Image (spheres, helix red, strand yellow):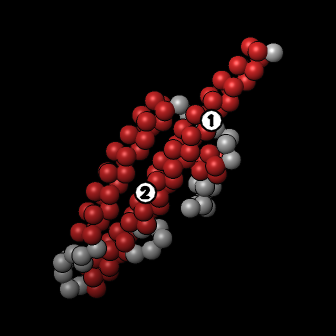
Amino acid sequence: MQTAEGGGAFLAAAQQGMFAVDTESAGQMMMSIGQMRDRVNVQLRRIRDLTIEAKLGDLPEARGIAARDRQVASGDKQSLESVLQRFAEALQEAQQALEIGMRNYVELEAQAEQDFRRVGHG
C-alpha cells in the first residue's frame, strides 16, 4: 500500500533490489516489528471501548462531547483507529520489504561467490 507520506518506497526499493539485509539483522528487525504489530492490535481492540457513547448527561454540551469522543476514536480518516490501522499496514509492508531484502542478500552473496570463483580460475 502506498501512503500519502510515501510509505510504499521501502517495499518498492526492496522489490527493485535496491537493498539487501542479512538474515540475522532482518530477523531482529522483524521480531521488533512483530512485537509492535501485537501492540497496535491490542490498541485497535481497545478502541472499540471508546466508540461506546459515554454517559455524560443530557445537556447538549455533554452529548456533543460524547459524540466528539467517538469521532476522535473511530470516526474518520484522522481518527485514532484509522491512524493505527495505517501504522499496522506500514509495519506489514516493512516486514514484507525485509523478507525481500533477505532474499536479495542471499542472491547477492551467491553472485559474489560465483564472481570470486570465476576470478580465481581466470
Q: Residues within 10 Å of mark 2 (few under 14, many from 20)?
A: many
Labelled disc at residue 107: 1
User: Can you give x and y, in whole percent of width and height, for residue 42 in the image?
Assistant: 28, 56
Count up the numbered dots. Answer: 2
Q: CA distance from mark 1 to mark 2?
A: 29 Å
User: Can you give x and y, in whole percent of width and height, for residue 10 in the image?
Assistant: 60, 48
Which residue is painted at 35% across and 68% down in the image? 73
Q: Is residue 121 left or right of residue 9?
A: right
Q: Secondary structure at mark 2?
A: helix
Labelled disc at residue 88: 2
Q: Quadrant of the C terminus?
A: top right
Q: Quadrant of residue 105?
A: top right
> Residue type at mark 2?
Ala
User: Can you give x and y, in whole percent of width and height, for residue 56 in the image?
Assistant: 20, 77
Q: Quadrant of the N terminus?
A: bottom right
Q: Quadrant of residue 87?
A: bottom left
Which residue is painted at 46% across and 53% down in the image? 92
Nearer to me, 104 or 113 = 113
> Residue type at mark 1?
Glu
